Structure formats: C-alpha cells, structure tokens
Amino acid sequence: MNFHDSEKIMGILKREGYLPTDEPKKADLIIFNTCSIRKKPEEKLFSSLGRLKSLKRQKPSLKIAVCGCIAQQKGEELFKRAPHIDYIFGPQNIGKLSSILSLERGVFIRENPEIQYEELPADRVDGIRASVTVMYGCNNFCSYCVVPYTRGREVSRPLDRIISEISELVDQGYKEIQLLGQNVNSYRDGELDFSDLLRKINNIQGIERIRFITSHPRDLTEKLIKTMAELEKVCEHIHLPIQSGSDRILSLMNRGYSYEEYKGKVELLRTLIPDIAITTDIIAGFPSETEEDHYCTIRALEEMQYDGIFAFKYSPRPGTKAAEMPEQIPEEIKSRRLSEILKLQDAITLRKNAGLIGTIQEVLIEGRAETGHSTGRTRTNKIVLFNKDIPPGSIVKARIIQARIHSLLAEPL
Ligand code: SAH
Ligand code: SF4
C-alpha cells in the first residue's frame, strides 16, 4: 500500500514538472514515505534524515518532506527531532501534495478541508502489474495495529472510478490488476459489494489476472469464495492473515474469529478452488502469549500448510490497546518463537514447492532478474525463473523443473 502511495506521489510530482533522480545531491525535493506498522522503520527514518542535515545546510533551497504513517503519528514532534524538515503530511493528504508544496513549510495531518483533494493518476513503476486502491483506512481496531489511527476510517472508493482507472490501465497495456485495501472484503458502494466489484472487473476486456490484498478472515464470505471460484481472471491465491492460532490471543487481538472459524473458511476455499495457494501473516509474542498459545500457532501452521507466511515479532505501537497490556513478552522469547515459526514454515514451503516439480503452470512474465533470468509468477503468486529470455507481458505455459523456498525454476513449453 505504501509502495502504491509512492506511485501516487510520483504521479503528482510528474504533473508538477519534477523529474526523478537517484542522487540526493541533485534533488530539489526529497520525500520520505514512511511506515509505522512496526518500530524498525522509525529508526531507519531518523538515520536517513540525519544524513541529509549537511546537504540542507549547503543547499537551503532543498525541500525535505516526511509523509506516510510516521508523519501522521508524530506530526509536529518530527520538527523538533529534525528541524531541517519542511513538510509533514499524512497518508490522507497525499492528494493535496500540489497545494502543500506551494506553501513554505507546514504540518498536514488532519482533514484540512480548505485544501482541495485531487485524485491523480499514479506514476507506476511496473509495466505489467498495476496496484489500484479500492478502499482507504480501516475500522477494525485490531488491538496491536496502528493503521486505523494513521490511515483513518474506512472509506470505499466509488465503483465507477475504480472501473475507469482499470480501463485506462488496460489501454496502457497492463495485464494484471492488484486491488488494494486493508480489508477488501468489506468493500461497499451502495448495494454493491466486493464480489460485485470483482465481477465487473472480470468483464473488462484485456485484463489477464486479478488479485487483491488484504482479506480479513472475519469478512470472507461464502459468496466471495464462490465468486473467486467462478471468475476466470481472479487468481487462485488468497492472503488470509491468521495472526495467531490461539483463540485466547485472537480475542485479545480483537480479530473477530476463532481458529475453528478460520479453519472452516480455509476448508471451503480449498474445496471450491482446489489448487488455491494460501498465505498468511503471523505475530509472535503478543502480550501475555504463553508457550501453549505459541504452540497453538505452530499447530495451526502444521494444519493449514500455507504456501508462504510473513511473520513478525510483536512490536508495541504507541496509542494502541495492546501496547498498554500488562505481560509484554521479553525480546529474546519473541525472537525464539519467531525463529521456530519461520523454521517450520520454511520446511512446509519447500515441501509444497517441491510438490510442483513436473507440473505445468501458467506464468505471466514480469521482467528479468539480476542474474539475467526472465522472471514471472504463477497464478498462485509463486515466483518462477527461466533460463531463457522471454518478453515481459507474455503468458507462457511452463514445466516446473526445480523448487526453492522463494522461487521455482521452469522451462517454457
Ligand atoms: N489489514 C491487513 C494487515 C495490515 S498490516 C490485515 O488485517 O490483515 C500487515 C501485517 O503487519 C499484519 O497482518 C500483522 O501481522 C503485522 N502487524 C501489524 N501490527 C503489528 C505490530 N504492532 N507488531 C507486529 N506486527 C504487526
Ligand atoms: Fe490493522 Fe486489523 Fe485494520 Fe488490518 S484489519 S489494518 S491488522 S486494524
């Protein structure tokens, strides 16, 4: 989502006449688009800002901006830590960037209704797959998560705007559309829901593949699963974050489902879409997590047999409920639990990938790896490498000949 926000920022700057540069010394404007989902990116931001101090001294006309979720959360406070910043603006103010840059300096982390919000075309980095926002914000307030505070309340984008953006992307030659939202399953435009949106996109001529992130397990309905199964362009992959396998922890997290309910949805997915790949997110060491709770997560990984996971140590975020909970887990326990989770999943991922050796997969070629190999993805979102050079954008049938944890090696038929 942040990556796509950066593409939107680039789209606005391009229209304003800016050109990109890789050299900070040449820049008239430097923008840091930040993430605050965990603590680490915050530390990175301050060290990057520190490096720019002398540059700003040498070239006072250089403008420095910090946007994204850290900007939204810290606001004015950032000026105190780094007085050489010129602009601070939150994710909800990206559409106002042109007006912001016309001012001398300032903080823009509220609604600022006096400034006109514009929806501008994003300047996308990739030429094959395009991200398209379907909704902003989140209303879920999972107890560990900063997103509802930094990205605000959930708002669905009008369906006709989404369709017209996608139609333009198809004209530009994009083959794959990735729909973005914190909880796409709760998308609504009047009577129409996410299944209806998928159906309309599926009818657009020229699109080859449709993906979406992220699905909240609580809001994944039978209607949506049936729609996914029915629509030929919707890929056989779902990212369905479980977070924990323990009902006690899931309840403290305010996730709104039990492990059994989650499991039921996975069973339905696998029944109606037999080859579906399922990936997930896990948090290790949520406050008060016992060895028994951790073991529930380990058992869930064994039962679910995910195709891949993103796992993180719990990171207390200021202002969230979980950060105030007693019984925060010591760092070394979190680390140990995380490495147990990752070790188990590596073995599962490798075994699942090895099971694909000899199968024929449809691969959309996306580009070339540093090694010179052509790369692409299966419909199930697995990365595939080839020994041959194949033009990006083409769709090939390929036989899988070798499996690794993060990629498959294949030969085109
Ligand atoms: N809206 C998506 C998730 C967005 S955040 C959803 O509900 O699935 C992406 C992932 O970051 C989350 O799924 C969670 O696993 C992780 N995450 C969020 N807050 C975190 C925190 N405070 N500490 C560690 N991981 C966190
Ligand atoms: Fe955060 Fe939960 Fe919203 Fe996802 S659904 S963004 S984890 S509050």
Image (spheres, rainbow, N blue to C red):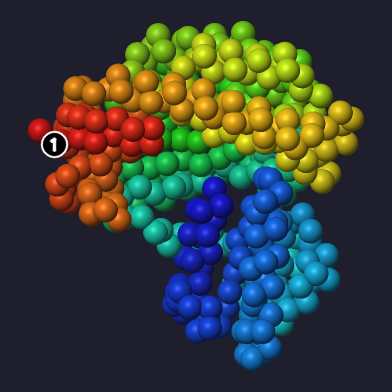
Q: How far from the left and from the top, in percent, is residue 37?
A: 67, 45
Front in this rendered view, residue 342 or 76: 342
Q: How far from the left and from the top, in percent, is residue 249?
A: 74, 20
Is any atom of residue 173 visible in this view? no
Would you say 161 lies left or right of 383 here? Answer: right
* Residue hosting label 1: 412
Would you say 373 lies left or right of 200 here? Answer: left
Which quadrant would the C terminus be assigned to in this image?
top left
Q: Is residue 278 above or below residue 202?
A: above
Q: Quadrant of residue 94?
A: bottom right
The residue under the point 89% across, 30% down is: 326
The residue under the point 73% across, 30% down is: 333
Q: Is residue 323 above or below residue 361?
A: below
Q: Is residue 165 above or below residue 75?
A: above
Residue at far left of view: 413
Front in this rendered view, residue 335 or 113: 335
Secondary element at image label 1: strand
- Disc 1 marks a residue whose amino acid type is Pro
The residue under the point 63% across, 36% down is: 312
The residue under the point 70% across, 24% down is: 255
Q: How far from the left and from the top, in percent, is residue 345?
A: 49, 25
